[in-house]
Each structure stands twice: as structure tokens, then as C-alpha cells.
Image: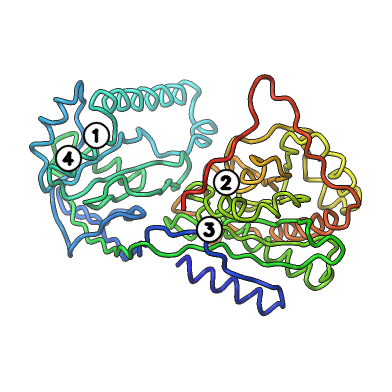
């Protein structure tokens, strides 16, 4: 899937006359998702809402077994004793939520007293579960014990604290399937198991491991005419978690930067500085593609005028932090004075701001003292409902706002390219804290 996206993206740039290459930066574990069929078969029949987690082993045809819940552990010895009886079972690995009703619903329609009681219950459940896991030696120890005991699989849940949204990441197991269930269905099977009501599960999950496969960044370039060794970057990561379509993380950033490059190619094909659209691989595994690019291209880091990164969904860009670069606000002030008010009126500039400590691919340049900026749209809505969830789908995109954002990116790239002055990268004092450091790319 990743390679198909790379090929499609490169083909579009070629059709626009934008120079493009797929630049290999390393390898990663290849894994191909098949189907996941999950059915509760006792004490009643019900098809469950869930999916196999990324890099999970599959099954060899349908597998059926009882569902068991984790007990309360007080020591690793408790874990060892319990694990002796779970061969062939599916283990519910997490605490269940007392409610899957979104908090905004509780606050709007519930009484303050019921909302406070529900919050207290949720916090108490999470605290008790965490204490039990720590007493057993941690989740890693629990998963190892489950696999060594010959369990059929593990069931997990990570609710996104919003209606119908669940966070889906990678499998904690390496030998048996890991299946993520929705908040509602995980709560159902965990309660049935905890209450001794004999739940049984049938799972048919297909997956194929492909070995080590090459991984790439896709780099589109408009060469500079006057200052070819100075650079403006438009960046977004192309990879996504596959619990859904990755539409807002980060299909939206991808098409935004593509459209900005299409605009620039049409109206500004011979920029003063070199303009690069960089579509990164491996962001979700630790900013790997952008970190590798920065390592491999010190000339771009040294000559960087500005990098503009977008990586959080839809809605209009409404916040840009200067990341602690003392001179950046002056450049942005000039640029914003030339951008139509209908675009800038939504945006707060944080001057001089502070550098972020993580998050997205602009950090691969900030950690090297180069001017990287995040073009950020509304974050709470994105974080709650579409960031790494099973409902991050095409229908969540707001194309009016994406057009606005692409226009903003194209204008910023043009203005940064034409600016007579380099963006100032003197770093502010951080009250005893140190500037974020770079870690080596995991290739």
C-alpha cells in the first residue's frame, strides 16, 4: 500500500512537469493486511466491530476459543499461576470503559453529579488496572506469559474518548493475533468474561509478513534560479496507520502540499530559491523518513530558508508557532501583510513561541537549528476523533478548507522564496531547558 501511494504521487508530479524522485532511506518490516472476521458465538451470536492490529500475526483459518479477562495481579507469581489455565483462550488485555458515551454528551445532558461520578469511576478503574499490570511486571511480561501459555490471541481496546472513535496502533504480540475491538464491543466481552458468563470468540484473521522491504521518501522539486542552494520545503508525511483510511493523518496534508506545488508550478515555475515538496515515509514510526533526509542532505539543512509542515487533519490553518526562533516573527509579519485577510484572519501567530519536543516532521529540522514550522489546524477535534482512529476516513475532509490551506502554503512558499532576508534562527532562552536534540533515524 505504501509503495502504491509512492508510485501514484510520483506519477502525478511527473504529469505536472514537476521533477520528482523516490529516495530510498532504508528498509522496514513488510506486512500485508487481509480480512478480519470476529464473531461472538456464545452466550449469544454477534459479529463484533474490530480489526487485527498492524503487524499482527494472522490465523490459519477460523479459530474458536473462550474469552478470559485479566484478574487482579499482586505479583509476577500471580501471573505465572494464572497463565497455566489460558491455553487456547482469547485474553481481554485491557480494562474496559464504564461508558463509551462521549464526554461532551455527559457534560451537556447529564447532571454535574452523574458526570463527576462517571469521571471518578473511570479514573478508579484505570488506576486499579494499571496497578495490577505493574504488579505483574508490566504489559510486556503479561503478553509474553500469554504467548508462552499458548493462548489463541489477545483482545485490546483503546477508546478515543469520543463517539465511535477508537485508537488503533500496532500489535503487542509477535506469535499470536492481536485484535482491537471497539469500546462498546470490548466492554461487552470483557464484562461477560469477568462475570463468568462463558463468552466464546471465533476469529478468522489473514495477514502476510513480507520480510524487509525498501522504504522511500517522495521528493518533488522546482529548482531555484537565483539562489538554488537555498531551500523552501513543503512537507507532509505519506504513511498512515491502517485502522481506517488515514484521511486526516495525513492524506489531507499530502494533497494540500501537492496542490500547493501544482499552483507554484503553474504560476511560479522558476522560483528564486529551490522549492521542495517532501512526502515522508515512516513518520508514524518515529519521524524516520524526515530524520533520514535531514541526515542525508546537510546541504538542505544548511541552506534552509523555511520548512512548512502540515500534519493534523482538516479545518482551516489557525495556529503557527515560531518555534522559539527569535527572528522568524519578522519574516512572517512581512509575509502575512501580503496574504489576503480572508486567509490570515483565522490564524494566530505565536511569536517567538517555544520549540516543540516532538510531534511531526518539522522537528527533524528544528532539532538541527533550522527553521521548521507547523501549519496547524484545530487540534482538539482532530486529536479526539480522527487522529489514529478507525473513523479517519475520506468523508471527514473539508475541501473548502483544504483549498484555503493549499493556497496559504503556496503563498508562504512563494514569499519565503522571494524574501531578500533569510529567516532568523537565533534561539530563545528556554529557562534552563535545552533545545530539542536530534536522534538518529531508525533505518
- Residue 160 in percent (x, y) is at 45, 41
Of pointers 3 and 1, the one earlier in the residue sequence: 1
Give the class, few, some or many, for how many residues have Cα within 10 Å of label 3's Cα (few <14, many ≥20). many
What distance separates the C-alpha of mark 2 from that of mark 1?
33 Å
Q: Which residue is mark 4?
A: 68
x and y percent of residue 73 in the render? 20, 25
Residue 3: x %, y % from top left? 48, 69
Instruction: Tell me the CA gap for discs 4 and 1.
Output: 17 Å
Ranked by sequence position, the earlier of labels 2 and 1 is 1
Quadrant for the N terminus in the image: bottom left
Label 1: element kind: helix
Residue matched to label 1: 141
Residue nearest the observer in this picture, 92 or 115: 92
Residue 94 lies, in percent from the top left, at 30, 37
Q: Residues within 10 Å of mark 4 (few under 14, many from 20)?
A: many
Mark toward the viewer: 2 or 1 = 1
Identify residue for label 2.
382
SS state under label 3: loop
Disc 3 vs disc 1: Cβ atoms closer than 8 Å? Answer: no
- SS state under label 4: strand
Mark 3 highlights which residue?
281
Question: Could you tell which of marks 3 and 2 lies nearer the N-terminus?
Answer: 3
In the rendered view, would you say 31 is above or below 173?
A: below
Q: Are dots 4 and 2 in contact, CB under 8 Å?
A: no
Amino acid at each position: 500500500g505504501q509503495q502504491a501511494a509512492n508510485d501514484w504521487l510520483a506519477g502525478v508530479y511527473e504529469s505536472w512537469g514537476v521533477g520528482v524522485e523516490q529516495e530510498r532511506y532504508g528498509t522496514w518490516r513488510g506486512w500485508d493486511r487481509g480480512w478480519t472476521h470476529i464473531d461472538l458465538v456464545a452466550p449469544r451470536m454477534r459479529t463484533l466491530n474490530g480489526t487485527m492490529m498492524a503487524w499482527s500475526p494472522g490465523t490459519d483459518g477460523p479459530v474458536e476459543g473462550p474469552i478470559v479477562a485479566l484478574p487482579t495481579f499482586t505479583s509476577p507469581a500471580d501471573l505465572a499461576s494464572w497463565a497455566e489455565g489460558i491455553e487456547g483462550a482469547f485474553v481481554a488485555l485491557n480494562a474496559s470503559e464504564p461508558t463509551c458515551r462521549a464526554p461532551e454528551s455527559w457534560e451537556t445532558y447529564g447532571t454535574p453529579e452523574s458526570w463527576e461520578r462517571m469521571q471518578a469511576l473511570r479514573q478508579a478503574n484505570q488506576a486499579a488496572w494499571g496497578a495490577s499490570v505493574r504488579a505483574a511486571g508490566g504489559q510486556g511480561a503479561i503478553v509474553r506469559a500469554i504467548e508462552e501459555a499458548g493462548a489463541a490471541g489477545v483482545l485490546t481496546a483503546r477508546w478515543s474518548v469520543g463517539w465511535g472513535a477508537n485508537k488503533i496502533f500496532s500489535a503487542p504480540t509477535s506469535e499470536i493475533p492481536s485484535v482491537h475491538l471497539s469500546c462498546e464491543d470490548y466492554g461487552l466481552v470483557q464484562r461477560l468474561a469477568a462475570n463468568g458468563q462463558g463468552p466464546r470468540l471465533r476469529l478468522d484473521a489473514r495477514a502476510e509478513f513480507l520480510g524487509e522491504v525498501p522504504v522511500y521518501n517522495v521528493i518533488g522539486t522546482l529548482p531555484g534560479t537565483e539562489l538554488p542552494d537555498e531551500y523552501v520545503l513543503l512537507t507532509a508525511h505519506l504513511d498512515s496507520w491502517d485502522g481506517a483510511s488515514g484521511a486526516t493523518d495525513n492524506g489531507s496534508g499530502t494533497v494540500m502540499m501537492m496542490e500547493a506545488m501544482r499552483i507554484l508550478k503553474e504560476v511560479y515555475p522558476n522560483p528564486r530559491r529551490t522549492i521542495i515538496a517532501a512526502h515522508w515515509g515512516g513518520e508514524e514510526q518515529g519521524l524516520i523518513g524526515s530524520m533520514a533526509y535531514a541526515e542525508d542532505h546537510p546541504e538542505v539543512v544548511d541552506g534552509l530558508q523555511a520548512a512548512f509542515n502540515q500534519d493534523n487533519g482538516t479545518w482551516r490553518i489557525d495556529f503557527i508557532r515560531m518555534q522559539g526562533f527569535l527572528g522568524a516573527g519578522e519574516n512572517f509579519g512581512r509575509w502575512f501583510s501580503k496574504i489576503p485577510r480572508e486567509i490570515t484572519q483565522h490564524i494566530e501567530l505565536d511569536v517567538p513561541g517555544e520549540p516543540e519536543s516532538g510531534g511531526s516532521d518539522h522537528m527533524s529540522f528544528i532539532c538541527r537549528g533550522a527553521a521548521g514550522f507547523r501549519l496547524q489546524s484545530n487540534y482538539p477535534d482532530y486529536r479526539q476523533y480522527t487522529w489514529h482512529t478507525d473513523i479517519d476516513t475520506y468523508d471527514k475532509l473539508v475541501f473548502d478548507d483544504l483549498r484555503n490551506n493549499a493556497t496559504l502554503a503556496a503563498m508562504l512558499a512563494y514569499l519565503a522564496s522571494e524574501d531578500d532576508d533569510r529567516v532568523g534562527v537565533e534561539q530563545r532562552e528556554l529557562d534552563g531547558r535545552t533545545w530539542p536534540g536530534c536522534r538518529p533515524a531508525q533505518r
